[in-house]
Image (spheres, helix red, strand yellow):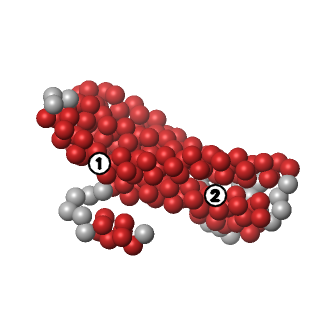
Amino acid sequence: MEQVVDGIASSSHCQAGAVIALSGALAAALGQATANGTLAVGASGEAAEAARQMQLRLTDIRARFLALADQDASAIGELVRRRESGQALRGYQQLCDGPRDMAEQALAAARLMQDFRASVCERTHDDLEFTITLMSGVARAAGQLLDSNLRIWPLPELVAQYNPVVDSLMARIDALQPVTRIRR
């Protein structure tokens, strides 16, 4: 992990997309740990099934976040290639699709985790709340990255295609319910 963090810190260009996606993968992994903890204390019935389902779904989401991080790392180079071949719009769309997909994955994960609240064991309950907060932040950061891309490249085609996406994402992110305090 130190190598990845050092690589980002020493980079001469921002890597927001990769950082957001890696944050999503880490939050998904923490969510899986809460499911593991619930299974480890001997959950049965609906709680055990909820933990197994969360574990399976978060495995897919974590893998998707890692793929999105890799994709983001090569996206600027792909944009340059597309620009040189006369397909600049497609390159810009790819740079908008990544954060959109990150936000969608984070929203799905956060909703899944919120639904798991009823089944999580007491031992990992607080960790689940941290994870929901982290994943909500990943969703918001990804939505902001998409919005930033539209500011940087205000092409009418991009704005028309992605502005409704930003509006929808932000409304769904605002509907998430991370707790503000652990102790009530």
Quarter of the rendering occupied by the C terminus: bottom right
- Which corner quadrant holds the N terminus? bottom left
Q: Amino acid at mark 1?
A: Ser
Circle 1 residue: 74
Q: CA distance from mark 2 to mark 1?
A: 28 Å
- Residue reaching furthest left? 84
**Compared to 66, does 95 lie above or below?**
above
State the image quarter where residue 11 is shown. bottom left
Q: Is residue 74 left or right of residue 166?
A: left
Q: Where on the picture, by quarter, is residue 93? A: top left
- Residue contact between numbered discs 2 and 1, judged by CB atoms under 8 Å: no
- Asked whether 139 or 177 is in front, the reply is 139
Q: Is residue 117 visible?
A: yes
Q: Circle 1: is it few (<14), some (14-19), or many (20+) Cα within 10 Å?
A: few
Tell me residue 178's x, y (percent).
59, 56
147 above or below 113?
above
- Secondary structure under tag 1 reads helix
The amino acid at mark 2 is: Gln
Which residue is nearer to you in this view: 81 or 18?
A: 81
Task: Tell whether 112 sits left or right of 23.
Answer: right
Q: Position of residue 148 (x, y in %)?
A: 29, 46
Dot 2 or dot 1: first in sequence order is 2
Total count of labels: 2
The percent position of residue 164, horizontal first and vertical second, equals 39, 31
Say which residue appears at 56% left-offset and 55% top-offset.
28
- Inspect this view and state whether residue 176 appears: no
Q: Which mark is residue 32?
A: 2
Q: Is residue 36 left or right of residue 4?
A: right
At horizontal 74% and vertical 69% (from top left) the residue drawn is: 123
**Looking at the image, which residue is at 45% across and 52% down?**
66
In screen coordinates, is 173 left or right of 36? left
